[in-house]
Image (cartoon, rainbow, N blue to C red):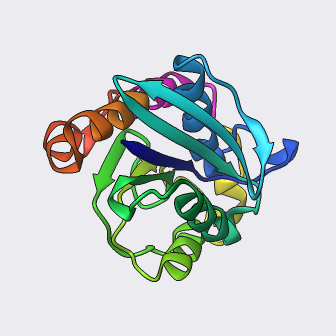
Amino acid sequence: MKYLIAGLGNIGEEYRHTRHNIGFDVADAFVAKHNASFDNDRLAEVATCKWKGKTFIVIKPTTYMNLSGRAVKYWMDKEKITMENVLVIMDELALPLDVLRLRPGGSDAGHNGLKSIQESLGSNQYPRLRFGIGNDYPKGRQADFVLSKWKPTEIPVVQQKINACCDIIESFAGIGLARTMNEYNKMIFPL
């Protein structure tokens, strides 16, 4: 059984470890946990991980956030992975920092990466793991906030959530989306 894990973010050193790039950070942690590594390939950095008879194709799109759908669609088609075996991981401004939320589908909620994926797939019914980044920014400064680095006080909870995301990815493949949602949905972490 194959799974596509798509961690969303932007390429470039200026975006490294920013709130908007948390999908890349989760992908990096998952690949490291499984002793694999990324290679540059078409439209993405790609790693292949094996776990309990499952194969994970993990991608970090190199298309920038607004065109993430091109990479997701390409790798789904190339690896012959069905939509229900895709898990997209991204930042979520509408959720507080202490929350993770797993969903089977839904709206893009204004997230440009999800909007691109929905356009490329012709559907919004693909699983996604929303990583709450909070919304503690002055009016009109949303872009600055999402592209900012984590505050030192936030890093411990961010690391806990990254580790939980790795467990959720394994659970998603091991017991399926519905049971994983029952077990992990709307996880709240102590700040």
Q: Is residue 35 above or below residue 179?
A: above
Instruction: State which quarter of the image contains the C terminus.
Output: top left
The picture quadrant where one finds residue 188 is top left
Q: Residue at x 50, y 21 (%)?
A: 156
User: Which region is colored magenta?
Assistant: 151-165
Q: Is residue 141 visible?
A: no
Corner quadrant of residue 32:
top right
Tell which of 163 and 59 is nearer to you: 59
Q: Nearer the viewer, residue 156 or 84?
A: 84
Q: Quadrant of the N terminus?
A: top left
| Residue located 37% across and 38% down the image | 98
Left or right: where 106 falls relative to 182:
right
Residue 70 percent across, percent down from the top left:
66, 70
Magenta residues: mostly which secondary structure? helix
Q: Is residue 125 magenta?
A: no
Q: Position of residue 120 (x, y in %)?
A: 56, 78
Give how far across and how far down residue 139 sits, in percent. Answer: 60, 69
Instruction: Please determine whether, in this image, residue 171 is positioned above or below residue 51.
Output: below
- For the point 65% across and 62% down, the residue is 71
Number of numbered markers: 0
> Is residue 158 magenta-colored?
yes
Q: Nearer the viewer, residue 141 or 49?
A: 49
Left or right of residue 7: residue 157 = left
Is 14 left or right of 57, judged from the image as shown? Answer: right
